[in-house]
Amino acid sequence: MAETAPPILRLEGVRKSYNVGTPIEVEILHGIDLALAASEFAALIGPSGSGKSTLLHIIGLLERPTVGRILIQGRDIGALDEAGITELRGRTLGFIFQFHHLLPEFTALENVMMPTLIEVGRYDQTMRDRARWLLARVGLADAVDKRPSALSGGMQQRVAIARALAMKPPLVLADEPTGNLDSHTADEIFALMREFNRQEGAAFLIVTHDPRLAARCDRRVELIDGQLRRAQTP
Amino acid sequence: MRFEWVLALRFLREGRMQTALIMAGTTVGVAVIIFITALVNGLQASLASRTLSTQAHITVRAADEAPSPVLDRGQGEVAARVEPRVQRLRSIDQWERVFRELSDLPHVVHVSPLAAGSGFAYRGNASKSVALMGVEPERYNRIVGVADKLTAGSYRVGPGEALIGVELARDLGAAVGDRIRVRSSENREDVFRVTGLFDLGVKDLNRRWVIVPLRSAQTMLDLPGGVTHIDLTVDDIFAAETVARRIASQTGLTAESWMAINTQLLTAFNNQTMTTRTVRAFLVLIVALGIASVLVVSVVQKQREIGILRAMGASPRRIMQVFLIQGGLVGGVGAALGSGLATLMVYGAAFVLRQDDGSPLLSGAIELEVYLTAAAVALVTGLLAAVAPARRAARMDPVEAIRYG
């Protein structure tokens, strides 16, 4: 990774507590410092309950940290209001969830267009073309008009990946993207993410339990009891 | 199509059963609201027009004579019993001027002078107490359509001619062409040839009214050139009281509207209207609760999707709009379908409900205003009912929604 590339993501001293100010206050994250370079392909690993999901939600701007700074493309999000954060999230972040979370009322194509529809406000040919191209890339050219319920788990997750990339986000966050897939399908999904990382230049941060997959990432970030262990390179 | 509309329409389309049921509910609600409004309006209009077929909307007459004190109240103690004055038959002062003034008033449609008093009608040995109605036939016919209610003869009231009711004709044994003798309360007598018999649908009137030329009545009642009443019709019968009050304050005369004369009928109308309003209010409430409950369920069902939409950059405001649009659409479509259904129902009711003479009770037409009001109420109800579910959707925490997906 080039030293000069500015980090796409930087966390400085991030702490997260719940039930602040009450007797049952509990701190989940104890001062996280993390930088993710553009186009980096990183795994976030750690045992259950170590705070992986919380960290991912904070990076995904779905939750705010109790203490600490978050910079996305060098921009401090602490200064942004809710509307600003929503807009930034839509433009710069792509999400892939364990339970794909596709909208069952919409076809695969419409699901892939959804982030762009939210941003632009109405359907246009450009987003249609991009969505078709993405679905073709994930091998679902024939399934564009199918509803999620007509697709297998692996196919649904591929639609979700295509959707996460619809807005060409510089950073894609994946929460156990292969968690409920068989190992063969999991490999396929992983390969697809890798491909998009190389060809589109999107940085990926993948939460996974699967050491096999983690081992194939450029970098592994390990979270134990709410603290990061030193970054390892394979 | 905008994002919010795309989502709202798709959610409604895919919620098939729920959507169908709530649309049906709204449709029926709107239809019943329109139907009962049209029904009650129709019944009231029908009843009012029947009542008003024998009386003027407003009758103007000279003010009652009040006793005028001889002593000033300031001049010490006076123990006195004030005897009410006897009300003489009097003419309206300068009635021609008043007549012109009334004709020019807004809302007033027809004006007709009337010289009325009491008397007796004789034929052979029979004598009957009657009400002498001196009219200008053409003007009077526009107030009380006697011409349409003739059972025999023709509507002709020339000098020496009279129209009498069917009951009086029977009492006197008179037919068209016969002559009757009439003596007034002022003890003046005249002979009239009966040119027509009328049936006003009210026995008392059929038994008492004798319609004669204005001039003859003036002579017989000792009111040379004078009239006792001026009858009016107005364009909106339910505005009669307001117009009457204006006339009274403007002219200083006594002006009584049909509403003041038929207070019982009016009370019945008001009670009916109140009842209808209550029923309508409850229907609106039921429709609102129906729409709200369906949307609340929809919000809960779509928790995960709302979460993911929020994560993808949809602001709470836009999520809220998605559900407000759904409420508005249900209300709007329900209003449209309900209007159609109500039209059929009113048409059917007009076909089935008949008056005693066999004519339809309702015209079958619904005023545009009723449709528009019902549509507006349905739309607003839909939107308001959606507010709570929409706020709930907008407040949904994306993390919670996604985590427990």
Image (cartoon, helix red, strand yellow):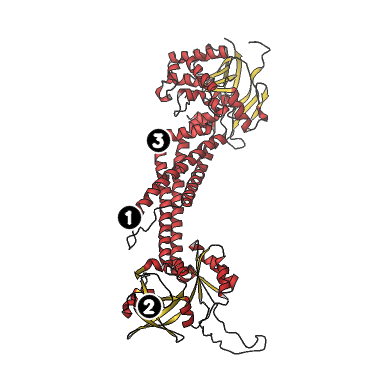
Residue position for label 2:
B193
Q: Which residue is mark 1?
A: B352
- In the displayed structure, B330 sits above or below B131; it is above
Whichever of callouts 1 and 3 sits on the residue coming sooner in the sequence is 3
Say whether residue B325 is left or right of residue B149: right
Q: What residue is at 43 percent from the left and 45 percent from the top?
A: B26
Under circle 3, the secondary element is helix
Structural crowding at the residue carrying mark 1, measured as other residues with C-alpha within 10 Å and reported as few (<14), some (14–19) or many (≥20): few
| Residue projecting furthest to the front | B159
User: What amino acid type should be assigned to the residue bearing mark 1?
Assistant: Val
- Residue B43: % across, % down: 40, 60
Circle 3 or circle 2, nearest the eye: 2
What separation in Å lies between label 1 and label 3 (alpha carbons)?
36 Å
Where's residue A30, x and y in %? 62, 25
Q: Nearer the viewer, residue B79 or B350?
A: B350
In-front residue for pair B220/A164: B220
Of the image marks 1 and 2, the number of the one nearer the N terminus: 2
Gap in angstroms between the C-alphas marked 3 and 2: 77 Å
Residue A65 visible within the image: no
> For mark 3, does the 10 Å Cα neighbourhood hold few (<14), some (14 to 19), or many (20 or more) residues?
few
Q: Chain of mark 1?
A: B
The subunit carrying tag 2 is B
Q: Position of residue B285 (x, y in %)?
A: 46, 50
Nearer-N-terminus badge (3/2): 3
Q: Which residue is mark 3?
A: B16
Question: What residue type is disc 2 on?
Answer: Arg
